[in-house]
Image: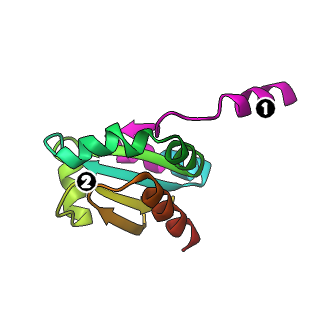
Amino acid sequence: SSTAKAQETTSKSSTQINFIENSWTEALKQAARQNKYIFVDAYATWCGPCKMLKATTFKNNKVADFYNDNFVNVAIDMEKGQGPALAAEWGLQAYPTMIIFTSKGKPVSGTVGYIRANDLIKFGRQALNK
């Protein structure tokens, strides 16, 4: 219905990226269902730049809108649950590492370390254009 659509657009400005927490399996499921790429925030709880990303870049309105619209977003603590196995599989060396995967779970691109809002949007755009 058109009224539901109108409501959706008004409340659309996101205040942060909506992440699935710690479930790569769930991310893959949703990506397949929505036919979207997956954005992974691979972090560790002790990692300063990871906390900074969450407090700043991920809360940027433009970043939030862009990533919530275009990606299934998942934040994974690389030291618990599926984390260690994924870290080994993906060959992660440092945190934060952000990786974009196809809906089938094939890596498209990655970036390591703290990143500013406009650079994170650029990173996402480049992945979508590959």
Query: In this orientation, does residue 104 appear?
Result: no
Coordinates of residue 73 in the picture (x, y in percent): 45, 46
Q: Residue at x 43, y 53 (%)?
A: 39
Judging depth in this view, the residue of 31 and 74 nearest the camera is 74
Instruction: Judge the density around disc 1: few (<14), some (14-19), many (≥20) Cα neighbours within 10 Å.
Output: few
Mark 2 → mark 1, Cα distance in angstroms: 36 Å
Please identify the quarter of the rendering in which residue 123 is found: bottom left
Coordinates of residue 100 in the picture (x, y in percent): 43, 61
Q: Which mark is residue 121?
A: none
Q: Residue at x 25, y 56 (%)?
A: 86
Mark 1 residue type? Lys
The residue where tag 2 is placed is 96
Question: Vertically, is 23 above or below 107?
Answer: above
Mark 2 residue type? Pro
Q: Which residues are magenta?
A: 2-28
Give SS at disc 1: helix
Q: Residue at x 37, y 60 (%)?
A: 99
Q: Residue at x 45, y 50 (%)?
A: 28
Coordinates of residue 50 in the picture (x, y in percent): 25, 46
Question: Vertically, is 3 above or below 33?
Answer: above
Asked whether 18 falls inside the magenta stretch, the response is yes
Question: Vertically, is 66 above or below 89?
Answer: above
Residue lying furthest left in this view?
Answer: 46
Q: Is residue 86 left or right of residue 110?
A: left
The residue where tag 1 is placed is 5
Coordinates of residue 89 in the picture (x, y in percent): 24, 63
Q: Is residue 69 left or right of residue 73?
A: right
Asked whether 23 falls inside the magenta stretch, the response is yes
